[in-house]
Amino acid sequence: MEPSFNPSQIAENCARSSQVKTGRALGPMIVLGLLAGIFIAFGCAATNTAAYGIENVWTARTVTALLFPFGLGMVVVLGAELFTGNCLLLVGALDGRCGWLPLLRNLCVVYLSNLAGSLLVAAGCAFSGQMNYSGGQLALYTMRVAASKCALPFGNAFLLGILCNVLVCFAVLLSSAAKDVPGKLMGAYLPICFFVLCGFEHCVANMYYIPAGLFAKDVPAYAALAAEAGVDLSALTVKGFLLGNLLPVTLGNIAGGALVALATWYCHLRKPASGKK
């Protein structure tokens, strides 16, 4: 038996997976979407906790890049439903394996479920005292990260979203090439490490990063700490989260995922026109 699937088999498996995922009942789809949001949010919480005390940007970015990919690893191995990875379901729609309306249903349900799961973890971290590290410095770091994301120009956030989900979808495809758990984890690891290291924007990750900052801002002790440190939180608002970051990043993630899905289908599954070889 071959140790891994070849590229054509990966594409075929992706198309078949689209049938399963789009045909899944609503209840399991919601639960698996919640789990994916929670897994990614745990990765975000871990990276913030690991990096908040590191002043050197390169070192902090490297540490977060080494830790964050295990969130997607849990998604892949446990079969959770992640919006950004599910953009690859377009492969199945292009190949006629699933309908466009079931595809849209899956993406909408999974997106909202990812958001709910991420919000649960963000609220838990902000209101449980988890951010009290070093006298609230973790909370201050969390708010600073969230505010910087909300302050991104729309075009920048959109392009960073495209680059991010190209790598995320490559990670999903690489992990699906493996037939064992270590191979799946390694396949998912490096592309995710790359996107975090480069500072690309992931909508589901931002469903934790920014709400965690918003929730922390609502804790009087944390808000006072930010004011004392002179941290500008003017961009950190619900509007800044939804319209300033989540909207352009989501659109960019969709575009990046669609590019990978289209290339996968075109190269490995597209049927030649009648009469042509």
Image (spheres, grey):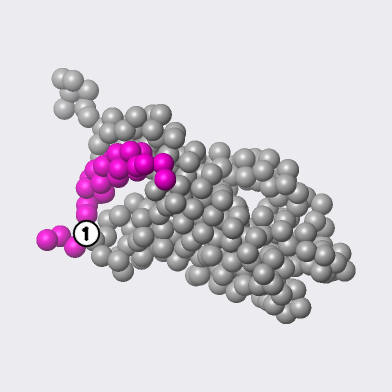
Counting from the top left corner in percent of width and height, residue 133 is at: 69, 77
Which residue is drawn at the image coordinates 47% and 45% (left, top)?
110
Q: Residues within 10 Å of mark 1 (few under 14, many from 20)?
A: some
36 sits to left or right of 18: right
Which span of residues is magenta-colored?
1-27
Image quadrant assignment for residue 48: bottom right
Residue behind mark 1: 4
Q: Secondary structure at mark 1?
A: loop
Q: Is residue 122 above or below residue 6?
A: below
Q: Is residue 13 magenta?
A: yes
Front residue of 109/145: it is: 109
Q: Amino acid at mark 1?
A: Ser
Q: Is residue 269 above or below residue 78?
A: above
Which residue is drawn at the image coordinates 50% and 70% (left, top)?
66
Counting from the top left corner in percent of width and height, residue 126 is at: 68, 65
Q: Quadrant of the N terminus?
A: bottom left
Q: Quadrant of the C terminus?
A: top left
Q: Residue furthest bottom?
A: 134
Residue 187 visible from this viewpoint: no
236 sits to left or right of 125: right
Residue 109 visible from this viewpoint: yes
Q: Residue furthest top?
A: 275
Counting from the top left corner in percent of width and height, residue 193 is at: 48, 63
Which residue is drawn at the image coordinates 71% and 58% (left, top)?
215
Counting from the top left corner in percent of width and height, residue 45 is at: 59, 66
